C-alpha cells in the first residue's frame, strides 16, 4: 500500500515552533528548509525547532535541507542581450560581456558538450554545443 507524504517548505512565515507543531499535527511528514535563503544561523534554529517538534510528535517528522546548486554570476551588461531561440552564445571566464560573448565569474572548465547552462534563474535554458579552449559555445 502506498501512502502519501506531505512535504512542507518552511520559511519566515512558517518557522515558529507553534506553526511547525501545527503543520506536524496536520500531517507534515517532511520539513524542507531551502538553503538558498536565510543565514546559516537561521537555518540551524529552524532545524532545531523541527527536531524539538519531532521529539514530541508521532509519526516522526523528517528534515530536508535543500542545498542550492552552483550560482555563477555574469559580467555586468551595458544593455540587455537578446537571445533568440536557436541562436548561440559564447561563455568565457571574464569581467566583461558583449552580445556575442558573456563573461562569467568563475571558470567553466568542468562544463562539457551536452551540459545544460541555465540563465535568468532558470528561465532560459541553453545546452553546451562545443568547447573552445577555456570557453564554451551554447545554443
Image (cartoon, helix red, strand yellow):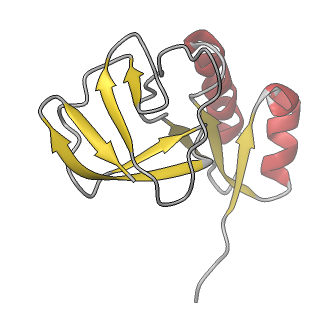
- The percent coordinates of residue 103 (x first, y second) are 39, 21
Q: Quadrant of the N terminus?
A: bottom right
| Residue in the picture at 25% in, 22% down | 107
At x 67%, y 24%, the residue is 46
Q: Quadrant of the C terminus?
A: bottom left
Residue farthest along the left direction in this orientation: 133
- Relative vertical location of residue 87 with respect to residue 15 in this rendering, above or below: below
Instruction: List the single residue furthest toward the bottom.
Output: 1
Name the foreground residue: 107 vs 14.
Answer: 107
Pinpoint residue 73: horizontal percent, then vertical percent: 47, 21
Q: Residue at x 49, y 31 (%)?
A: 99
Q: Examine the rendered structure and indicate whether residue 11 appears above or below residue 30.
A: above
- Is residue 33 shown above or below 117? above
Please state the total of marks drawn on the protein image. Answer: 0
Residue 124 picture location, percent across and down = 57, 48
Nearer to me, 23 or 78: 78
Viewer-side residue, 12 vs 1:
12
Residue 95 screen position, x and y as percent: 39, 10
Question: Residue sitting at 45 percent across and 20 percent down?
Answer: 97
Image position of 74 (left or right of 1): left
Amino acid at each position: 500500500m502506498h501512502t502519501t507524504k506531505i512535504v512542507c517548505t518552511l520559511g519566515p512565515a512558517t518557522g515558529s515552533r507553534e506553526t511547525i507543531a501545527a503543520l506536524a499535527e496536520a500531517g507534515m511528514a517532511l520539513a524542507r528548509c531551502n538553503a538558498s535563503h536565510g543565514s546559516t544561523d537561521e537555518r540551524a534554529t529552524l532545524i532545531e525547532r523541527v527536531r524539538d517538534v519531532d521529539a514530541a510528535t508521532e509519526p516522526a517528522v523528517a528534515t530536508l535541507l535543500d542545498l542550492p546548486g552552483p550560482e555563477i554570476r555574469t559580467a555586468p551588461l551595458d544593455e540587455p542581450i537578446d537571445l533568440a531561440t536557436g541562436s548561440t552564445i559564447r561563455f568565457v571566464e571574464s569581467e566583461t560581456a558583449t552580445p556575442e560573448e558573456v563573461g562569467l565569474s568563475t571558470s567553466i572548465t568542468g562544463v562539457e558538450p551536452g551540459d545544460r547552462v541555465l540563465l535568468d534563474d532558470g528561465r532560459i535554458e541553453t545546452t553546451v554545443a562545443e568547447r573552445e579552449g577555456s570557453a564554451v559555445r551554447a545554443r
